[in-house]
Amino acid sequence: MAASTLPHIAHLSKDRKLKPILAVVEPYELKKRNNIGLHLCASILSQQLSTKVAAVIYERFLGLFEGNEPTMQQILDTPATTLRSIGLSEAKSRYVHNVATYLIAHKITDRKFHAMGNDEIIESLTTIKGVGRWTVEMLLMFTLCREDVFAVDDLGIQQAMTAIYGLDASDKKALKAEMLRISEKWAPYRTWACFYLWRHKDAARETKKDKK
């Protein structure tokens, strides 16, 4: 199927300012993943780290389990001192244990995750200390492949929309309100819009580097 005939492309192209970006940015493919709890832990590991450093930490993390994807019980059974030995901070070590404890206690499996609605997942997981709304939104987008999630708190999305729509970023509250208003017309494909905004921002950054 050609990109122009994809349902989300046809719908998002109705936005005149977004349409030119859709025409030049490579299409994405959503692919659901298993072991959702592990991906939530991986998101915590990568917080405030560059992509490169986060990948190294995650490989070290898997190395604790001989390269295999651990269960929540295996993560919970791993001492905090061991987690810190691979580069995790004391706080992140606690947060990873918090996730494992919560998912085990509430019997939240992959099947249960897939049966839950977006708001239900956000409400549930943000009760875990160390897990914020943005982290859950990334899980919904990249792991559960939910098509209608809008990450209004994401700095990259804020910067991209400020540039594309000429928004005033000086008042964060007003900025987010305007972003939400604009994003309403993207439903039910707001996840896709975020993907293209991220890619557009990355492409613009690379262009600036090339000009230097």
Image (spheres, rainbow, N blue to C red):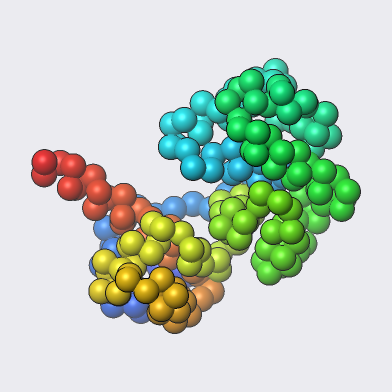
For residue 167, above or below residue 104: below
205 sits left or right of 83 in the view: left
For residue 138, above or below residue 85: below
For residue 42, above or below residue 181: above
Image quadrant where residue 21 sits:
bottom left
Percent position of residue 169, x then y: 33, 70
In this figure, what is the number of numbered marks? 0
Nearest the camera: 160 or 169? Answer: 169
Percent position of residue 179, x then y: 41, 75
**Residue at 68% over, 63% down:** 122
Confirm whether residue 52 shows in the render.
yes
Percent position of residue 84, x then y: 65, 26
Nearest the camera: 108 or 124? Answer: 124
Nearest the camera: 90 or 158? Answer: 90
For residue 38, above or below residue 194: above
**Residue at 61% over, 30% down:** 88
**Residue at 59% over, 53% down:** 135
Image quadrant where residue 124 sits:
bottom right
Which residue extends farthest front? 90
Which residue extends farthest left? 211
Confirm whether residue 196 shows in the render.
no
**Residue at 48% over, 63% down:** 153
Image quadrant where residue 120 sits:
bottom right
